[in-house]
Image (cartoon, helix red, strand yellow):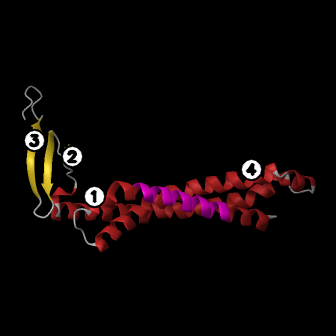
Amino acid sequence: ITKYILKEHISPFIFGIGTIVFLFILNILFRDLGRLLGKGLPIKIIIEFFLYQLAWIVALAIPMAVLIATLMVFGRLSSENEITALKASGAHLYSLISPVLIVSIIIAAGMIQFNNYVYPESNHRLSMLYSDISRKKPTLTLEPNVFFDDIENYNLLVHSIDDDTDVLHGIIINDSSDPKYNKT
């Protein structure tokens, strides 16, 4: 029974991880890929950027995949009356749940280690990479005709950016550092 229940969890778990990772990667691709490719960055840097993003994706995807697998397997076992048949044959309910609980504790221990060591290091490297990219390509975060408000008390609006020379045209700067006077 233990092998059967654990074997039933493998495919929904892999399906759950694959689906969730795919959705998060699509989100990152649509959000960042055009901006990174449009700035002339080497493909190695872009791949490194996406690999560092995988840490937070894995940290979210594995718990969600465990939930998906558990709900799918026990829902299917219940709908096909396999739980009733196992209980009628003398199997206790705890013997059905205990293998999944033990594996989930092992996964939780692995995720604690991952979240304590790999995830922070990956986030640090991602922020350092993004900082290096911003220093080498300062116009990376600027988009034409979109307000830029990452600088405290200042808003920038750039009408156009020359990608070859990184020259900005039509800049409007709004200074709100003094609450009494708003300067443009």
Please name whichever residue, 136 or 27, is drawn nearer the observer in this view of the structure. 27
Q: Is residue 64 left or right of residue 151?
A: right
Q: Which residue is mark 1?
A: 35
Quarter that holds the C terminus: top left
Q: Is residue 109 left or right of residue 52?
A: right
Please name whichever residue, 5 or 18, is drawn nearer the observer in this view of the structure. 18
The local crowd at label 4, few if under 14, some if 14 to 19, many if 20 or more residues have their Cα within 10 Å, is: few
Q: Is residue 52 left or right of residue 153?
A: right
Q: Earlier in the sequence, mark 4 or mark 2?
A: 4
At a point 84% along the width and 55% down the height, the residue shown is 82
Q: Earlier in the sequence, mark 3 or mark 1?
A: 1
Give amino acid for label 2.
Asp
In what element is the residue under mark 1?
helix
Residue farthest bottom in this picture: 44
Position of residue 150 measured from the top left corner of the image (x, y, whole percent): 21, 46
Position of residue 40 measured from the top left corner of the image (x, y, whole percent): 22, 67
At a point 39% along the width and 67% down the height, the residue shown is 51
Q: Which residue is mark 3?
A: 172
Write the start and end of the magenta stretch as one range.
Answer: 11-27
The local crowd at label 3, few if under 14, some if 14 to 19, many if 20 or more residues have their Cα within 10 Å, is: few
Q: Are marks 3 and 4 in contact (CB under 8 Å)?
A: no
